[in-house]
Image (cartoon, rainbow, N blue to C red):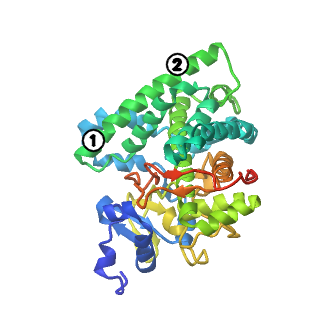
Amino acid sequence: MAENITQSILDINLKGPEAALDPYPLYDQVRTHDPVHWNQADNTWYVMRYADLMTIIRDDRLSSERFKTMVMSLSEEEKKRYSPFIESVLSWILMSDPPAHTRIRSLVNKAFTPRMIENMRTRIQTLVDGMLDKVQGNGRMDVIADLAVPLPGIVISDMLGVPEEGQPQFKKWSNDIARGLEGFDGTVSAIERLDMGQKSLLELSDYFRGIIKNLKEQPKDNLLNSLVEVEEAGDRLTEQEIVANCVMIMFAGNETTTNLIGNGILALLQNPEQKQLLQEDSGLIGSAVEELLRFDPPIQKTRRTAKVDIDLGGKTIRAGDLIAMCYGSANRDPEQFEEPNRLDITRVDNRHASFAQGIHYCLGAALARIEGPIAIGTLLSRMPGLKLETNEVERNPSLVFWGLKALPVSCVSSGPPLPLVAA
């Protein structure tokens, strides 16, 4: 261990309350002095530098089946109690390794096509306009409750053939599953989250099974029907694989896009010169969203498990150890990005880490790159005088799904609407 690493750096807890309020100052300290950091609080190695993360994210000596390692903290009785939750999550493509991952991802990709995603563009614009119509005359809105939460839920539901009226229930299921995934730390609150997560996962799974049964009798043109029918070399997805990955798509698509929109609007409001620049030049919306993804990503980290001993950054990571790939830190690495703590919507060559890389590159990246620009661009063009209504914003207590509980803004127009920001 390098002698210049002080005990205060080694003691930094990247899963503690200070990190949950604002992780970026801690990221800077740890990345500078201890870039492969053992975090005692969650027994996990944190990879902080961009170059290290990009190296290890494609390393086949790491396993994405980290859920197996995470559940080791449970007693045998608890493992049995939560076996439905565990078995479902282990069927998700983002929690699997080749060859199982290769097979399922290939089949899902054939159903989740670029054409299907692009065909959602007009529907997304209509939804955003409708949501803003409801609040524009009020003078105030909560960006999270009025736009960022309902939009991705309805979009994913449309794609999966789920009726729009069920949105509040689906958002609750999504939230419970997300919290359940963070429940493996042995505390009472963790067990409570697991109970809620498993209950919601089972209810959502049963719901999808009912839809699948109906689709077999009356096929429809949607993603879920494509997952049922997709075939490659005579191979099809099993019903369990379809249900499990629909649950994953529903909860992951909800959480990440909600956070992209909320974090993005907050960053622009806190950097008014960048907001004004975007409003003056609609052609910047694409690079703006990429910069917002870099600056404050909707997912701060994901974890893998070391299959063998690995040397990284002067540290030896032992087989079986958990590794957190810290996207939020990598995206602020000065070795990769000039002035990384400054929001710059004109930034070029912005190869951020927010959608991961390699075989686990984000399945919904293309959809996020449609929803984000339309939601953010339309809000700013219709409400050019948008202002933050609070000095303190409250974050969700998670450094995985990094987002806001609420984002109150005043939305009285300060003049005529600007030309619609291009998506």
Is 110 placed left or right of 67 in the picture? right
Query: Disc 1 marks which residue?
Result: 191
- Rendered image: mark on residue 362: none
Find residue 41 and report its horizontal and vertical position in percent.
Answer: 29, 61
- Residue shown at 57% from the left, 27% from the top: 164
Nearest the viewer among 144 and 358 is 144
> Which quadrant is the N terminus positioned in?
bottom left
Query: Disc 2 marks which residue?
Result: 210
Q: For label 1, count other residues whose C-alpha is less than 10 Å away and answer few (under 14), some (14-19) or many (20+).
A: some
Q: How many marks?
A: 2
Nearest the viewer among 216 and 344 is 344
Nearest the viewer among 342 and 197 is 342
Find residue 389 and report its horizontal and vertical position in percent.
Answer: 47, 55
Q: Secondary structure at mark 2?
A: helix
Asked if residue 363 can be seen in this view, the reply is yes
Query: Which of the two labelled residues, at mark 2 and mark 1, occupies the earlier sequence position?
Result: 1
